[in-house]
Image: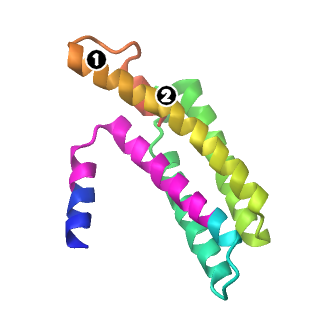
């Protein structure tokens, strides 16, 4: 287990800001998929598993929200802020009401955002590889979180 923790810590320490955002999206999606699987469980700890995974997904989205720089990110950052806030409210509702539909909706939204950020990471990597400037100024993209 220590090797895994060291590996993850090394990944985080060497990742670019855009890659860190990707890691957060991946972690949030993992938690939401685990939540969906827990809805199908027929064990006594089903609701505890749902609760724990939803709380973890909320913590991830909260971190994404906190990563936004509303000054530098402009309209995009403000839009993402509203979207993350919506997701957090929706997940709280999902946890209170044990609503699988709400979980699925948020997972789909998060997956769409992750796909967009994948493009950002690829563009950033291509610009490093070729020594050219990315299409978008990195600080504006990263500020949008």
What SS does tag 1 mark?
helix
* Count of marks placed on residues: 2
Q: Which residue is mark 1?
A: 127
Is 81 on the left-hand or right-hand side of 135? Answer: right
Residue 57 sits above or below residue 134 on the image: below
Where 1 falls versus 117 (above or below)?
Answer: below
144 or 69: nearer the viewer: 144
Residue 76 is situated, as x and y percent measured from the top left of the image, at 57, 27
- Give the CA separation, mark 2 to mark 1: 21 Å
Which residues make up the magenta segment? 10-35
12 falls in the magenta region: yes
Q: Main secondary structure of the magenta part?
A: helix
Q: Percent position (x, y) of residue 126?
A: 30, 19
Tell me where residue 33 sits by quadrant.
bottom right
Classify residue 89 by image quadrant. Answer: bottom right
The x and y percentages for residue 57 are 55, 60
141 up-or-down from 44: above or below: above
Q: Which residue is mark 2?
A: 73
């Amino acid at each position: 287990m220590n090797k895994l923790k060291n590996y993850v810590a090394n990944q985080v320490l060497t990742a670019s800001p855009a890659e860190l955002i990707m890691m957060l999206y991946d972690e949030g999606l993992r938690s939401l998929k685990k939540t969906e699987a827990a809805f199908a469980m027929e064990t006594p700890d089903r609701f505890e598993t749902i609760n724990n995974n939803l709380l973890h997904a909320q913590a991830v989205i909260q971190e994404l929200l906190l990563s936004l720089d509303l000054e530098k990110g402009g309209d995009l950052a403000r839009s993402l802020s509203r979207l993350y806030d919506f997701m957090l409210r929706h997940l709280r509702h999902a946890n209170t009401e044990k609503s699988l539909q709400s979980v699925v909706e948020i997972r789909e939204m998060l997956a769409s955002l992750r796909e967009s950020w994948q493009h950002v990471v690829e563009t950033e990597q291509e610009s490093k590889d070729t020594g050219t400037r990315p299409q978008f100024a990195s600080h504006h993209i990263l500020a949008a979180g």
